[in-house]
Amino acid sequence: MESLKLSREEIIICYKEDVERLLKFLPWLEKISGGEASGVYSGEGIGKSSMAVPVYDSTLLSFIKEIRNTDFINRNYVYTYSRYRIKTAKDELRVIDACSLQEVSVLGDILSKYVLRGDVKGAVWSEGVSNGVYLALLLKLKDLMEIRNPQA
């Protein structure tokens, strides 16, 4: 969903439900952020000649699934990365910190990168946890959605 000069209240109405659904993962992200949300299966009978199989945290997979059901997903997220010159996780964190409520779609584009690239390379889903981008995004969304109009 594009934020075409919508008022603060309209933006909050558009995204509030999606943000609330994602915020249920905030306690988990606060606990695990900076750590690993995946591993490699090493069950009985796995030998040196077997292929490594990644195993992802079930909460991470639920989080990714929940993101897919929001208006944040945008297949054209690469244009935002180009416009804001985002190349690294540090750049993503810089942009997240600088975003205002009018730029909430930029936050969605960063989420989109992790979800959509993770479809091709699952390790990308875990990167969002280990580099702290998911946590920073949710904290920023929570902060922006709690901001109320000064005249209210």
Image: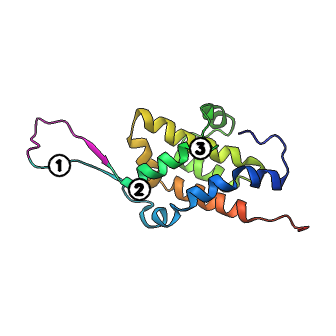
Residue at position x 44%, y 51% in the image: 62
What is the spatial separation of the Cα atoms under label 2 and label 1, in whole angstroms? Answer: 20 Å
- The chief SS type of the magenta part is loop
Tell which tag, 2 or 3, sits nearer the viewer: 2
- Residue 53: in magenta span: yes
Return the residue at label 3.
Answer: 110
What is the spatial separation of the Cα atoms under label 1 and label 3, in whole angstroms? Answer: 32 Å
- The amino acid type found where label 2 is placed reads Thr
Q: Over which residues does the magenta segment extend?
A: 45-55
What is the spatial separation of the Cα atoms under label 2 and label 3, in whole angstroms? Answer: 20 Å
* Label 1 packing within 10 angstroms: few (<14), some (14-19), many (20+): few
Q: Earlier in the sequence, mark 2 or mark 3?
A: 2
Tell which tag, 2 or 1, sits nearer the viewer: 2
Q: Provide the secondary structure element on which disc 3 rests.
A: helix
Q: Position of residue 109 (x, y in %)?
A: 62, 41
- The amino acid type found where label 3 is placed reads Ile
- The amino acid type found where label 1 is placed reads Ser
Q: Earlier in the sequence, mark 1 or mark 3?
A: 1
Q: Position of residue 89 (x, y in %)?
A: 53, 47
Q: Position of residue 44 (x, y in %)?
A: 10, 49
Return the residue at label 1.
Answer: 42
Q: Provide the secondary structure element on which disc 2 rests.
A: helix
- Locate residue 53 relative to residue 21 in the image: left or right: left
- Locate residue 23 relative to residue 1 in the image: left or right: left
Nearer to us in this view, 65 or 40: 65
Q: Earlier in the sequence, mark 2 or mark 1?
A: 1
